Amino acid sequence: MQIESFSTAPLQQIIPSYLYAQYSDDEDLQAFVATYNSLSQGYLDWFNNTPLGLYTSPNISGPLLDWIGQGIYNIPRPVLSTQTSFTRAGYNEFPYNELEPYNGLAHSTSGTAQIASDDIYKRMMTWNLYRGDGQMFTIGWLKNRVNRFLNGAGGTDYTVQENPPSITVSGNTFTIASFDNTVFSALQELLNARLIAFPFQYDVAFNSVGFFNDGGVLWMTAPLNYPTDPGGLSAGDVWYNGGTVAVVPGGSGVGAPVYFGVVTAAGLLALGGGGLPTSDPNNTNQLWNNSGLISISAGP
């Protein structure tokens, strides 16, 4: 009798079907059995490579991910919504001489709503299911979860020390600052809707750090993770210079075009400015290095 153990690898090969000897000379039956064995091996390989409890697997997506999230973990796929609804009805609810009829009923809705992608769904599940941080709410617990959500593609783990998020506390409000992107927007919507674990006693606010165009100069709303001094940086590195984004001299000036409105603050920090052209490319919204100051081309 064999005792099941996690230290024992699952069966990798099926026990194949075979023909009785008297039929071994029948090519059609041999082909049938070979096809049956091939299909069976395919099913076994799929189950070995797709453990249903491991939702972070790239093989788990779409309806299968929904089935696992709902059926195994009781976490349905969320709807990311910024919608607000307003209803007014009944006598004396509308001022006289407005468009609504007397004693009428009116509904109004604004905002957007969309089903979360597989990536966001997996990140949400990891936030709620991760046990390594413990169950006691602390600033470390929150930093780990925020960092893991923002950087752990497909719900995978991510070490907070690699890129710690900025979280400040004032009274009962925790303010999370991060580079503005779709993942951070999803986190905001999930937290605002209380679809991910967060103590009800506290409020949460957000500071989205991004770029804006100020008269052709690239400005940034906060330094978040950007160096604020060029000392010790390499040629072509970018740094936060009191609101503008500067480049350490010495880059090649030869690289793929980078565009305002497309590149994110995090993306530019990783890319650097060494490849930006050193003269105006006359290409609308393309970034260029204007004597160490990143500028935005107005076009021809």
Image (cartoon, rainbow, N blue to C red):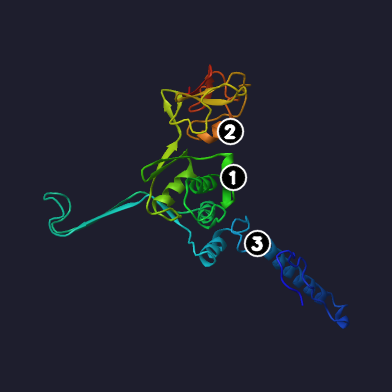
Between 279 and 202, the residue placed more toward the observer is: 202
Between 247 and 159, the residue placed more toward the observer is: 159
Whether the residues at callouts 1 and 2 have beta carbons within 8 Å, the answer is no
Please tell me whether residue 6 is drawn above or below residue 206 in the rendered image: below
Label of residue 159 in the image: 1
Residue under pointer 3:
50
Position of residue 30 in the picture relative to residue 165 (left or right): right
Q: Which residue is drawn at 85% across and 78% down?
A: 26
Q: How crowded is mark 1: few (under 14 residues within 10 Å), some or many (20 or more)?
A: few
Q: Which amino acid does label 1 sit on?
A: Thr
In the rendered image, which quarter contains the N terminus? bottom right
Please tell me whether residue 119 is drawn above or below residue 48 in the rendered image: above
Q: What is the secondary structure assignment of the residue under circle 3?
A: loop
Q: How crowded is mark 3: few (under 14 residues within 10 Å), some or many (20 or more)?
A: some
Between 140 and 32, the residue placed more toward the observer is: 140
* Location of residue 130 (image quadrant): bottom right
Q: Where is residue 192 in the image (x, y as percent from the top left)?
A: 39, 50
Label of residue 270 in the image: 2
Q: What is the secondary structure assignment of the residue under circle 2?
A: helix
Please identify the residue farthest to the bottom as the structure is shown. 22
Query: Disc 3 to disc 2, how far (Cα)?
Result: 33 Å
Q: How crowded is mark 2: few (under 14 residues within 10 Å), some or many (20 or more)?
A: few
* Location of residue 174 (image quadrant): top left
Please tell me whether residue 212 is drawn above or below residue 87 in the rendered image: above
* Location of residue 12 (image quadrant): bottom right
Q: Which amino acid does label 3 sit on?
A: Thr
Using the rendered image of the protein, determine whether residue 263 is visible from the camera's viewpoint. no
Whether the residues at callouts 1 and 3 have beta carbons within 8 Å, the answer is no
User: Counting residues from the N terminus, which is met first, the one under dot 3 or under dot 2?
Assistant: 3
Query: Disc 1 to disc 3, how far (Cα)?
Result: 25 Å
Q: What residue type is labelled 2?
A: Ala
User: Counting residues from the N terminus, which is met first, the one under dot 1 or under dot 2?
Assistant: 1
